[in-house]
Image (tube, helix red, strand yellow):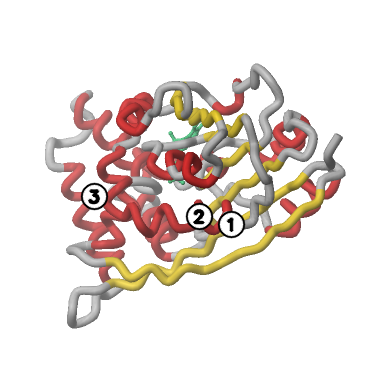
Amino acid sequence: MTTRWDPEQYLRFRDERSRPFADLLARVAHPGPSEVVDLGCGPGTTTATLLQRWPRAHVVGIDSSSAMIERAAAVAVPGRLEFRAGDLRDWKPEAPPDVVLSAATLQWVPGHEDLIPSLVASLAPAGVFAFQVPGNFDQPSHALLRDLASTPRWHDLLGGLGRPDPVLHPRRYLGILLATGAEADVWETTYLHVLTGDNAVLEWVRATALRPFLAAIDDAVRSGDEPAGATTEFLDACSAALREAYPPDARGRTVLPFRRIFAVAHVAGA
Ligand SMILES: C[S@@+](CC[C@H](N)C(=O)[O-])C[C@H]1O[C@@H](n2cnc3c(N)ncnc32)[C@H](O)[C@@H]1O
C-alpha cells in the first residue's frame, strides 16, 4: 500500500501546524550552530525558518516522502538550506550536528523511542536534540476514524489500520533523555486551534491520520475489490462523525483541541 503525503493538503493549516515548531525552537539554547538537521522536514516551510534563527548555519531537511521533498525544494537556498529524500532511521550524519530537530514525525516511526539515545549520541559537544510529537490519539479526531474502520462495512479492509497509540507518556521521554546524561526539558501543551472552512477537522486529518485509510481504499478501488464510490462513501461517513464531534459555531469556526508533547535535550560542551 502506498500512503502518499500531500504537501498542499498539509499546508492548508500552515499557521496551526507551524506553531509547535516555533514553540519547540524557543527552548533550544544553542548560540550558533554550524550544522542543523530537521528529520521529517515535510514541505520544508518550517525548516526554512531556521535560517533566520541561525543565519550562519548550514541546514539540512530529511524526509522519506518524495512529494514532500519536491515541495521543499521550492524553499531551498543553495549552500545554506538543502533537502534530501531518505528514511530518518538510516540517517548517518557526515559530521556530528550541533542541532537535530524533529517535529510531528517520530510518531510515524515504529519504535521511535529506541532511536532517541542514538540521536542524542550523534550530537557535537554542546549539541541539542529537540522533538515534538502529537498526544491526541485518544481524541475523537482519531478515535472516530478507528471506530468507523472497525464497523462491519469497513472492517475487512481497514480494521487492521487503526494502530495503537505510538506516543509515550511525557515522563517516559524525560527518562530516556535523562538516561543519556543530557539535560532534559519535557512539557506538553494543548492548543485550541480555531479552524475555518467547511469540514475543517476532516480537512485537517485528511493530511495526516486519514491517509493510511484512504490509501487502502484507493488501492482496493484500483484492484476492483471496492466500487468507485468507496472513497466518497468513507469520507462522507468520517465527515458526519467529525462534524458531530466538532460542531462549527454560527460563524463557521471549529475548535480543534490538539495536545502536543515537546522534549529538548542539551548535551554537555567539550
Ligand atoms: C506531519 S509531517 C511533519 C512535517 C514538519 N516537520 C512539520 O512540523 O510540519 C510528518 C513528516 O514525517 C515524514 N516521515 C514519516 N516517517 C519518516 C521516516 N521514517 N523518515 C523520514 N521522514 C519521515 C513524512 O514524510 C512527513 O513529511
Q: Is residue 245 visible?
A: no
Position of 92 with respect to 15 (left or right) is right
Considering the numbered disc 1 on the image, is that residue within a helix, a strand or a loop? loop
Q: Position of residue 152 (x, y in %)?
A: 33, 51
**Alpha carbon separation for disc pair 2 and 3:** 35 Å
Q: Amino acid at mark 1?
A: Ala
Residue 221, compared with residue 199, is above or below; it is above
Q: CA distance from mark 2 to mark 1?
A: 6 Å
Amino acid type of disc 2?
Ala
Question: Percent from the top left, x then y, of residue 210?
Answer: 35, 47
Q: Is residue 72 above or below residue 144?
A: above
| Nearest-to-viewer mark from 1 and 3 | 1
Question: Position of 151 compared to 34: left or right?
Answer: left
Determine which residue is flagged by label 1: 26
**Category of crowding for the residue at label 2, using alpha-carbon neighbours closer than 10 angstroms: few (below 14), some (14–19), many (at least 20):** some
Q: Which residue is mark 2?
A: 22
Q: Quadrant of residue 157?
A: top left
Location of mark 3 (residue): 234
Total tally of numbered discs in the picture: 3
User: 65 or 221, which is in the foreground?
Assistant: 65
The amino acid on which the numbered mark 3 sits, given as a three-letter code, is: Phe
Which comes before the other along the chain, label 2 or label 3? 2
Label 3 sits on a secondary structure element that is helix
Q: Position of residue 160 (x, y in %)?
A: 45, 41
Q: Position of residue 162 (x, y in %)?
A: 46, 47
Q: Residue furthest bottom?
A: 250
Q: Is residue 212 left or right of residue 167?
A: left
